Amino acid sequence: MSAEQMRLRITFSKTAAMRYTGHLDLHRAWERAFRRSRLPLAYSQGFHPQPRLNLAAALPLGFTSDCELLDAWLETVQPVEQVLQALTLALPPGMVVRSLEQVDLRLPALQTQTQSAEYEVTLLDPLPGLAQRLEALLAQSTLPRHRRDRDYDLRPLIEEIVLLAEDGPGPHLRMRLSVREGATGRPEEVVDVLGASPTSARVRRTRIVLR
């Protein structure tokens, strides 16, 4: 790796226009944006070079976000303001850069640094007794669940849930869930445990907490 390389940390929004874009397609959208921007994106070594792009945590299909994190490596150091301008013009609708900074090349991979994530969840249908359901959920010491052919306990993955509004356009919750390697809590699982249909929930990620 050249000493002249540059590592950027980009915070970006994924809005409703990109809600149904999956993790791999999001990665490809960033690769295309760097190509259109003509910025000197760095690639890995070997027979099948890959763009050096590192997303912090996969965002489930159907979710929006204000706070996605991407680390990108450039082959040469560029003025941050010029990089921001070039990417802003190259990104597709539904992706917006919120901030961009140069970070140390030696920092660990983003995926190993994620600790938790915060979400705002709006239920599109009324859920009677939501406050009581939430209290009962948080009182549990274990919440056995089954996902992708394996059993796991959801309860230790829930760090905090706050009921922001029980009525209005729809019940509104704030959740902070674990996003550690091998220990990721999913908002739709919490919605299901509360007795609502995950398909009737709108989820927006508002913060990714790093170690």
Image: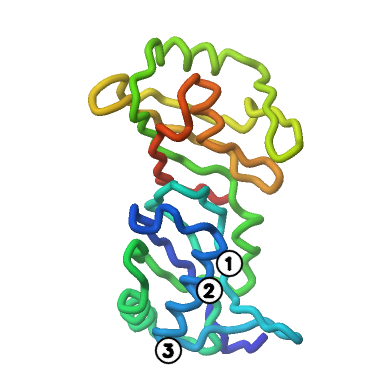
- CB within 8 Å, label 3 to label 1: no
Which element carries disc 2, helix, strand or loop? strand
Write down the quadrant of residue 38 in the picture.
bottom left
Under mark 1, the amino acid is: Asn
Residue position for label 1: 54
Q: How far apart are the alpha carbons under marks 3 and 2?
A: 14 Å
Give the residue drawn at x 57%, y 89%: 4
Q: Nearer the N terminus, badge 3 or badge 1? A: 3
**128 up-or-down from 49: above or below:** above
Q: Could you say where residue 193 lies in the image, as x and y percent from the top left?
A: 55, 22
**Between disc 1 and disc 2, whose residue precedes?**
1
Which residue is label 2 attached to?
72
Earlier-in-chain disc, 3 versus 2:
3
Q: Residue at x 51, y 34 (%)?
A: 188
Q: Give how far apart the Cα atoms at labels 3 and 1 are.
A: 19 Å
Separation (CA) of disc 1 from disc 2: 6 Å
Q: Residue 80, position in %: x, y?
A: 38, 79
Q: Position of residue 13 (x, y in %)?
A: 37, 58
Indicate the amino acid at tag 2.
Ala
Residue at mark 3: 38
**Pointers 1 and 2 in contact (C-beta within 8 Å):** yes
Q: Is residue 155 left or right of residue 32?
A: right
Which image quadrant for residue 3? Answer: bottom right
Q: What SS does tag 1 mark?
A: strand
